[in-house]
Structure formats: C-alpha cells, structure tokens
Image (tube, coloured by chain):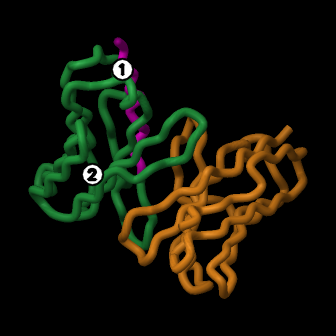
Chain colours: A green, B orange
Amino acid sequence: ELKVEQNPLFLSMQEGKNYTIYCNYSTTSDRLYWYRQDPGKSLESLFVLLSNGAVKQEGRLMASLDTKARLSTLHITAAVHDLSATYFCAVDIRNNDMRFGAGTRLTVKP
Amino acid sequence: KAGVTQTPRYLIKTRGQQVTLSCSPISGHRSVSWYQQTPGQGLQFLFEYFSETQRNKGNFPGRFSGRQFSNSRSEMNVSTLELGDSALYLCASSLVANSPLHFGNGTRLTVT
C-alpha cells in the first residue's frame, strides 16, 4: 500500500530561522505536489515537481525532489509569521488520485 | 477568474439521511476530484471525473457516489449517513489530469 510520510508533523520555529520538512513516499512516481492550508481555509498549490532533481523556489520556500530516494523536501528560509500554516505533500497516483501526507503544522513565532 | 465554488458551505444532517454536495469548477477545467478531510484520516481521495466519466474511485463504500454534468459541474452524494461521515469535503478541479489541483473552500458536513 502506498504510504506518504511527512516529518515533522508539528514544527514551531522562531522568525528568521531555517528548517526543512521531509516527505517520503513508497511508490514510484515522478509527480509530487506541495500544498499549503491555512486554518479554516482550503488548500493552495505551492509547487509541482515533475522529475528527478527538480527544484522550485517561491519566496522563502524551496522544494526539491529525489525520485530515486523517493524523497521530497520543503525548505524554509528565514521564516516569517505569514508562513504559519499546514503544509502537505502529495503524490499523484493517476488521474488526480493524490495520496497526501498527514501534513506539517508550522507555527512561526516572533 | 472565478475559483472552484462549493455549496453549501455547512451542512448538518442526521444519521440515516442522505446529502448532496455541489461543485462548480474553474471555467475550462474538465477534471473534477473530490476529497474527504478529517482530523483522524487526513485527506482521502473519493473520486475523479473527466468529461462526465468517473475515471478513478478511492476506497470508500458505495454510499458515496458522484456525477459530473456536461458543463463540468459535479455533485457528490452520500446516502445513509453515518457519524463517521462528518468531515470537510473538498472539491478540486484541474485543466487536465496530472496538473495542480485547485481546491474549493469545502463543505463541512456534520452528522448527528
């Protein structure tokens, strides 16, 4: 059975610090997504990673994909309060059947 | 460009009843997917429709069903509601399969 595991599940950071969220998955897939969800809100697409070695960056967030290790990372640089949210990675099995990780609840404190 | 619209936003139903949720995708998007989100199980895939055809179905009982209309709007139905069906139901659309999903704000269903 496909597993998508994120860690950590909870992350409390100080503003200005760096940290990485990890996403391991157990099936071959060359399509991995990162989403953000604010409390009480829906999911917002952050990154699509389509091939081994793919790296995408947007502001203070950078995502990468290693399909051989079945690992994706979401790196946060110099965190700010606005980044507080829950971050999900998701593996696309087929036709938008996505398997989501449990989510990482990030809190950035001043 | 309007986003994905889900109605209603909130629903309270009693065990044994049935419920229909509605989703209007982004204009031009032909793929509509449905997900259930609960604190215990997280986000789980229900089904996906493309051009009125269900192409994928997740591991949910037959009480959960859906359909898509010719204008790409979609509905999902849950019959004989159980307490465990209480969840946030999210609809998402995409231009084609294997492209990022655009999620609606969800319908929060509470079964009492």
Residue at horizontal 69%, vertical 82%?
Answer: B69
Magenta segment's dominant SS is strand
The amino acid sitting under disc 1 is Val
B43 inside magenta stretch:
no
Crowd band around label 2 with a 10 angstrom C-alpha radius: few (<14), some (14–19), many (20+): some
Q: What element carries label 1?
A: strand
Quadrant of the image containing the C terminus of chain B: top right
Q: Where is residue B13 in the image (x, y as percent from the top left)?
A: 87, 46
Q: Which one is earlier in the sequence, the residue at label 1 or at label 2?
A: 2
Residue at horizontal 36%, vertical 20%?
Answer: A108
Between marks 1 and 2, how big is the CA–CA gap?
30 Å
Could you confirm whether marks 1 and 2 are on the same chain?
yes
Residue named by callout 2 = A26
Residue named by callout 1 = A108
Q: Where is residue A102 in the image (x, y as percent from the top left)?
A: 43, 38
Looking at the rendering, the stretch of residues picked out in magenta corresponds to A100-110
**Where A66 sits versus B34, above or below?**
above
**Where A25 sits versus B30, above or below?**
above
A103 inside magenta stretch:
yes
Residue at horizontal 73%, vertical 42%?
Answer: B86
